Image: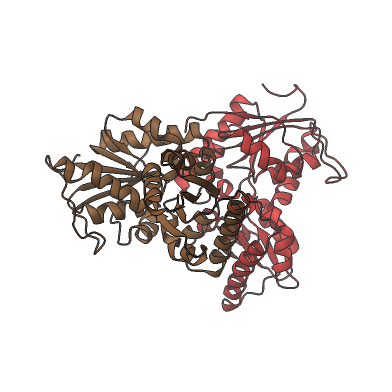
Chain colours: A red, B brown
Amino acid sequence: VSGAADIPTIGVFDSGFGGLTVLRALVSRMPQAHFAFLGDTARLPYGSKSRRTIARYAADSAQFLVREQGAEFLVIACNTASALALDAIQDAVPVPVLGVIEPGAAAAKAASRGGDVLVIATDATVQSHAYASACRAQALRALEKACPLLVPLVEEGWTDHPVTAEVIRIYLDELTQDAASKGLHPDTLVLGCTHYPLLRSAIERAVPTGVRVIDSADAAADAAVRLFGDGADRIAVDPAPESSLRCSSLRCFATDSVEKFERLGSRFLGCPVGKVELVDLGG
Amino acid sequence: VSGAADIPTIGVFDSGFGGLTVLRALVSRMPQAHFAFLGDTARLPYGSKSRRTIARYAADSAQFLVREQGAEFLVIACNTASALALDAIQDAVPVPVLGVIEPGAAAAKAASRGGDVLVIATDATVQSHAYASACRAQALRALEKACPLLVPLVEEGWTDHPVTAEVIRIYLDELTQDAASKGLHPDTLVLGCTHYPLLRSAIERAVPTGVRVIDSADAAADAAVRLFGDGADRIAVDPAPESSLRCSSLRCFATDSVEKFERLGSRFLGCPVGKVELVDLGG
């Protein structure tokens, strides 16, 4: 079930739909590649679960993409799985695996002048302190905050809603006050969850003046191009990405309710996801 | 691992913590019984998943309580599992099984004068129309509405928060306008999710004057007393329930993160849950 012999398949994995924002960024940069996307929707959300459980679920999912779909590269389009299970996934499959945390931290490094950055993410991502570690490796100081209501608000479709604006204001006020009390002067905010790009404009309206918003989905796609793209001489890179979304080969899989995936998925991908295939990972 | 020979064990099952509101109501009525509670926290929430997936998870959980913990009765303290998987659970175990939907509808029947009732619940419960069917069997007309943000708001701890009050106002406004457009004159609102009792006072402030709020957790506990209580001559029923919570024998199990369960569980149970034991259902 792999793609044509000379065009490799990139496997993209998320616990749900959010990773489609990463897929969108990947497709716009490498429209010639074959993509296989798996949303482990029967077991979402990962963001409230433990490292052990997330690692087990993520390894199952990665093995499906490599063994069943012939993926030659994997992008973990889920901050929680990247934060808690990147090692477990790398151990589970024999192909290169790229997470979203390191690229997000590298993009924050490129954006920040002062070196103090803020990160918003799920509970599990924050508790792992994966962003703080990745930022420290880039000589950045990072302050992380869990924003558990933002994913449900996106999934309710309230992306441009006064309640969502108020929740964002509350979370960002708490975060900036905490930063001030610690003597930090942040100039960069990392969106450390693949749902958050759908709230980007609301978040940009709520951040203090002078703070740049970094999307880890875009950062991961740029890193994927460097890792899997022209350098590998097998995947052409679009010189003018994001102009329009066209994908020559995309198969989408979900572990639950393909109808819901088809309905919500297009909101994240920015175009119809097509027919979604149901898979059973035995969970 | 069953209880003492002459005191039966009641198994109580939920996808997460919300069912502890049902457990609380059960313990207050039958403090002498032995209880085994399982929260399938590794696979929560059920409310956004499909019938097939929910039935599989719920049957696993029911079998654990009966086979491993010796439960002689089961209470499905989860509206979603009761709505979508009661038959599957009854097929999976050889003991009496009580859900929360029928008792909730019966309590609505007792409370409603006009016969028009409103039900708020998760997406999956509403899409199953289990409450509408159960209410129809009681000669009630029911209008159901999914309120997917309420569970995350409770889990964020925002039970007494202006954002939560506003979300409740929006949901109930939409529901009462929908009822008016259909010519209904509701006088009763059923809380069709075991998380919602923690929002009861906020919901009571938001419902139109004259609408009574019915808690399916209380209704299910009353039904359990009739089914498993003095009638069975083996479980004493407290004549003055809810005065204080004391439980002679309670074991709590979770499929993920016992720390989170211990922290959040006491908020739902109304007293410490004690040591929570981790179980692996293979999911």
Find residue A124 and report its horizontal and vertical position in percent.
Answer: 51, 53
The image quadrant that residue A107 belongs to is bottom right
The reply to whether residue A112 is visible in this rendering is no
Residue at 60% x, 42% y is A16
For residue A112, side relative to residue A184 (left or right)? right
Q: How many marks?
A: 0
Up-down relation of residue B246 to residue A241 (above or below): below
The one of B181 and A3 positioned closer to us in this rendering: B181
Q: Going by the picture, which residue comes out furthest to the left?
A: B6
Up-down relation of residue A117 to residue B277 (above or below): below
Find residue A161 and report its horizontal and vertical position in percent.
Answer: 68, 60
For residue B276, side relative to residue A265 (left or right)? left
The reply to whether residue B137 is visible in this rendering is yes
Up-down relation of residue B250 to residue A66 (above or below): below
Residue at 44% x, 33% y is B55
The quarter of the picture where the N terminus of chain A appears is: top right
Find residue A176 and report its horizontal and vertical position in percent.
Answer: 62, 72
Residue at 18% x, 54% y is B248
Find residue A153 and report its horizontal and vertical position in percent.
Answer: 61, 55
The one of A141 and B68 positioned closer to us in this rendering: B68
Up-down relation of residue B138 to residue A1 (above or below): below
Q: Going by the picture, which residue comes out furthest to the front?
A: B114
The one of B15 and B283 positioned closer to us in this rendering: B15
The image quadrant that residue A141 belongs to is bottom right
